[in-house]
Amino acid sequence: MNQIDAVERKKDEYMAESLEKALAKIPAKLPPPGMYGRIRSGIDAEIQLRSLRRKAFGFASGFVVLTAVVAVFWSVLAQELAQSAFFDYLKVLWMDRDVVAANWSSIGSSLLESLPVVNLMVWLLFSFFGIGLVWILVQTWSKTHPHNGSNHLAIYT
Amino acid sequence: MESSKKSKIIWGILMAILTLVILLAVYQIGTIIGFRQARFACQWGEKYGIMIGMPLHAPGSGPGGPMFDFPRRGIPSPNGANGIVVSITGRGFVVKGDDGIEKTVIISSSTQMRKGGSDARLIDVLPEDRVVIFGAPDDAGEIVAGFIRVFDHNLMK
């Protein structure tokens, strides 16, 4: 029994040695240069694309909501302005431009006092957020689609 | 790198101080304007009670005058008026605005008045004429007019 084991062991060692020698003769196949970089940039591009899609959806939703709010507040503001004396004061100032210099303080105060300040502030605030949202969207789009036509999100082949 | 970081910190501190100054200035201006408006409203309210025949010590005719619905109708503007002439006195006239608030307008030696394309005087103002006034409040809750534009009520129909 011990002899058979010894022979089996010798056979295994011989086979391992032969395999090592055979493998040493086969040249190692290296990956093409830059392949790791291309794989990495492809993964990054995919992550960036998904993030961009989420941002675009968020921006579009926010923009739709803000547009609706701005439109509603605009109608309220327009109604309040029409009911106030603001446009009447402007009409008189247009008709009698020469009196502005002599009465600038009372004219300025009257115009400010006739404005529906709270609604105007709310409308301007929502418009600010709406314009800011559009600006961020344009900036994000221009970063992902530069003017030279290249799209750095494309996966290199 | 150190010096650019320091200059950013200093720039940030300067902008914070400037913002604080602007906010405080706006707050102070608002306080001054609010005080003037409140004082005019108080004086106007006291006189309004007398004007409509309310006894001096009737309920609601305390230091602030009769209980006028200021929160809903707004504080009367002390620097201008716009509305229909309801009565004419020796010193001026009473204007009723579109908001229902009646203001007493006083004509001084420096008041400029125009009706149509030419200068006008108090005798040219008729009841139900539409007027736009720019002026300044006095201590009696009245508006001393600096400029008055009169629109003939016959032409407005």
Image (spheres, coloured by chain):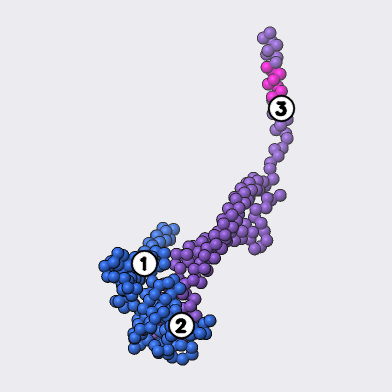
Chain colours: A purple, B blue
Q: Chain under label 1? A: B
Residue B64 lies left or right of residue A114; in this view the side is: left
Residue A106 seen in render: no
Instruction: Give the residue displayed 60% in from the left and 56% down from the top.
Output: A60
Span highlighted in magenta in the image? A9-16
- Circle 3: residue type: Leu
In the depicted view, which residue is nearer to us: A43 or A86? A86
The amino acid pointed to by label 1 is: Phe
Q: Residue at x 69, y 25 (%)?
A: A17
Q: Residue furthest left?
A: B57
What residue is shown with label 2? Answer: B129
Residue A73: say if magenta.
no
SS assignment at label 1: loop
Residue A31 picture location, percent across and down: 68, 43
Say the numbered circle drawn on residue A121. Answer: none
Residue assigned mark 1: B68
